[in-house]
Image: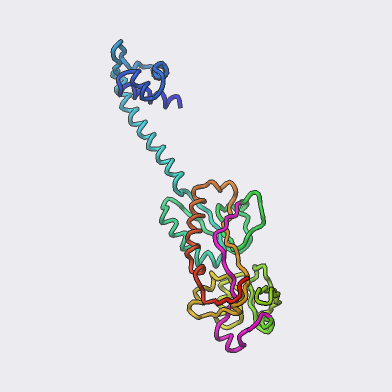
Amino acid sequence: MDKFESLKAFTTVVKTGSFAGAAREMQLSRSAVHKLVINLERELGARLFHRSTRRVTPTTTGLAFYERCVTILADLAEAEIAVSRWHEEPVGVLRVNAPMSFGVLYLAPLITDFMTRYPRLRVQLTLDDRLIDPISEGFDFVVRVSVPPESASLVVHPLASIELVLCASDRYLTERGLPERPADLREHSCLHYGYMSAGNVWKLDGPDGEQAIPIEGALCSNNGEVLKEAVIKGLGIVLLPTFLVARELRRGTLRAILPDYSIGSLSLCAIYPTNRHLSITVRLFTEFLQESFGRADWMETLPISRSHER
């Protein structure tokens, strides 16, 4: 810092032609500016100014040194601006983990949009459905369709709420009939997601209160896409988050079952280590996802009519 201040004092004296002028511009005392220049001359072992009672002029050595100093100080100022910009926009590597189906359908396209907006950012995206410890596994940002256990070392930021929906294909309903009340599900093939907390019991809240229905089915999987394809082909009824089946419900490929009953919702969360919460990359990515998911097709009105809402 002393070297920088000495160079700045020297160039300012050359520009203003006096120690007093340099002192005013730098908002220092005249003696402080004089001391900075004297120390610089002593360190260089060269005289930089001709001094008189009326004027201070640079020596030949001083002029040559001045030209170099101007370049050095300009480069330093440019570097400071560049560093400040790095703090204003995402740079470097962002390591992201997300569930397989959600990552493929929604997150991956948004990541490419985010990277287009911030071209100096690199992303490492890993997709899997297991429980992740961001700290031990080295992830900066984890997306999960559930709320993780509380941890002092992790920040959990809600991104969106995702409804659950029961659905089946017309092919299956033609063969097996349409369930009219929750108890009817006991007579149907009910496919279920292996990682879902509901497990083999589905809880439906309707006009008669909440009902817990044990279900059985030919297929259980830890991948929502597998279950969706199976239900489209008529294998049974499935309980899935709307982000997986919103498009199929709109197209009529699948139909909502027991629409007057609420089956709850899931919380889509961003999870990251507490030491990342001040990162400009994490903050901007969180805000970007929150805004984007607010416009996602699963958040729009679906062909699910519910006359009962608690």
In this picture, which residue range is highlighted in magenta?
Answer: 155-182
- Residue 127 visible in this rendered orientation of the protein: no
Above or below for 41 versus 118: above
- Residue 84 visible in this rendered orientation of the protein: yes
Among all residues in the image, which is located at the extreme top? 53
Please state the horizontal and vertical placement of residue 42, each as a whole percent of the image: 41, 16
User: Residue 34 is drawn in which quadrant?
Assistant: top left
Q: Residue at position x 49%, y 48% from top?
A: 280
Q: Residue at position x 44%, y 60% from top?
A: 112
Please state the horizontal and vertical placement of residue 101, each as a whole percent of the image: 55, 68
User: Residue 265 is drawn in which quadrant?
Assistant: bottom right
Please state the horizontal and vertical placement of residue 54, each as a whole percent of the image: 28, 12
* Front residue of this view, candidates 25 and 75: 25
Please state the horizontal and vertical placement of residue 194, each as a whole percent of the image: 65, 70
Coloration of the structure image: rainbow
Count of residue discs: 0
Above or below for 267 versus 8: below
Above or below for 218 versus 95: below
Decide whether residue 172 is among the magenta residues. Answer: yes
Decide whether residue 132 is among the magenta residues. Answer: no
Q: Quadrant of the C terminus?
A: bottom right
Q: Is residue 56 left or right of residue 245?
A: left
